[in-house]
Amino acid sequence: MGFSTKQIHAGVEPDPVTGAILTPVYQTTTFVQDSVDEYLSKGYSYSRSGNPTVQALERKLAVLENGAACTCYATGMAAIQAVIQAILSGGDHAIVSDVAYGGTYRLCTTVYQRYGVEFSFVNTADPDEVRAAVRDNTRLILTETPANPTLKLTDIAAVSGIASEHGIAHAVDNTFLTPFYQRPLELGANISIHSTTKYFDGHNATVGGATITDSEELDEKIRFVQNAGGVIMSPWVAWLTLQGIKTLSIRMDCQSANARAIAEFLEAHPKVTRAFYPGLASFPQHELAASQASGYGAMLWFEVEGGVAAGKKLMDSVRLCTLAENLGSVETLITHPVTMTHADVEEAERHRVGITDGLVRLSVGLEDVEDLIDDLSGALQRI
């Protein structure tokens, strides 16, 4: 069964009572039991522990990632938190991509380090550096590829091999490419993590997260944390996400095509000093991008002449591109990571990993690409 067919039909079926083609929103706190002896005979007791609408989304995502099971959460950060809590204890060590979403960095450094968990932020683009960072107490490798916001890639198969050799779990944040373009579990990873807020939703309507595992056993550990901590996805969010996923493949293909055209325009523009997009031949890891994923995605970044001041003026000058946090939506969003998504990362650390002050991140949407290019062209003329 092809991906587009699965994104529509996997995990769902018509309502057995009414025949409704859409999974109902089971907006309920609790579920009535037939008797004490038949407790959980229908499979549900309390929506924190399981809900039919949320479970439909979990089944669908597990199929799309070719995983064993999926657990959904209130946010993408809650999904990352559940993985950390399920695998790491005080005194354990984790290796994390040195370029990662600012919220991931903040969670590791300001929350879990307080409880005695050690983190090494490593250039996971180099498998030798990953191998050198492994300690006797390393229990988790968390990679983000493509990384936010520099798009640096990690060779998932190579790092998964290192993790397997040492009995370490390898989790991959796959938000930027989705299972339509990249499936980490097929490359040897143990967990694929998503902010469902992004491409799965696709319409700036919800926030949510998901973890998909390569085994039921690992899912049970993560699900226990989800239930114990109560960081569940709501039925309404699950229902909206189920609708968004139905168009994932066509949205991703169109957005990626738009991103490539814009990247080529920016790379050739005299006022742009650098343009980075995995689909460009000039991208440093272009061959890896082509080999481990079937598409390049819809994220790109660039810098303009004049540094920070010029970059800010450009973002204040666009008319169609929207200055807002988030990514993956049908609307094109423009972001200044240093002051927005990565403001919590120390300046020295940002510069060390290539998040420069003038970096402008673009999440390309579904608008007519000619209109987007005209908008950027006009803004570039005004700086």
Image (cartoon, rainbow, N blue to C red):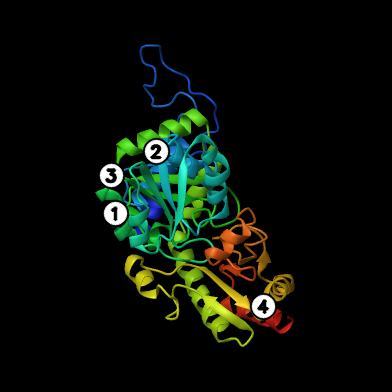
Distance between the alpha carbons at the discs numbered 1 and 4: 45 Å
Q: Quadrant of residue 211?
A: top left
Residue type indicated by callout 3: Gly
Q: Residues within 10 Å of mark 4 (few under 14, many from 20)?
A: some
Q: Residue drawn 51% across and 24% down?
A: 30
- The tag earlier along the polypeptide, 2 or 3, is 2
Which disc, if any, is residue 375?
Answer: 4
Q: Position of residue 331 (x, y in %)?
A: 61, 64
Residues at marks 3 and 1 touching, judged by CB atoms closer than 8 Å:
no
Residue type indicated by callout 2: Ile
Q: Is residue 197 left or right of residue 344?
A: left
Q: Position of residue 179 (x, y in %)?
A: 39, 57
Residue type indicated by callout 1: Ile
Q: Is residue 262 left or right of residue 339?
A: left
Which disc, if any, is residue 99?
Answer: none
Residues at marks 1 and 4 touching, judged by CB atoms closer than 8 Å:
no
- The tag earlier along the polypeptide, 1 or 4, is 1
User: Which secondary structure, mark 1?
Assistant: helix
User: Which secondary structure, mark 4?
Assistant: helix
Residues at marks 4 and 3 touching, judged by CB atoms closer than 8 Å:
no
Question: As drawn, which residue projects farthest toward the top?
Answer: 36
Distance between the alpha carbons at the discs numbered 4 and 3: 50 Å
Which disc, if any, is residue 167?
Answer: 3
- The tag earlier along the polypeptide, 4 or 3, is 3
Q: Nearer the viewer, residue 166 or 365?
A: 166
Q: Residues within 10 Å of mark 2 (few under 14, many from 20)?
A: some
Q: Residues within 10 Å of mark 3 (few under 14, many from 20)?
A: few
Quarter of the picture holding the N terminus: bottom left
Residues at marks 2 and 1 touching, judged by CB atoms closer than 8 Å:
no
Q: Position of residue 378 (x, y in %)?
A: 70, 82
User: Which secondary structure, mark 2?
Assistant: helix
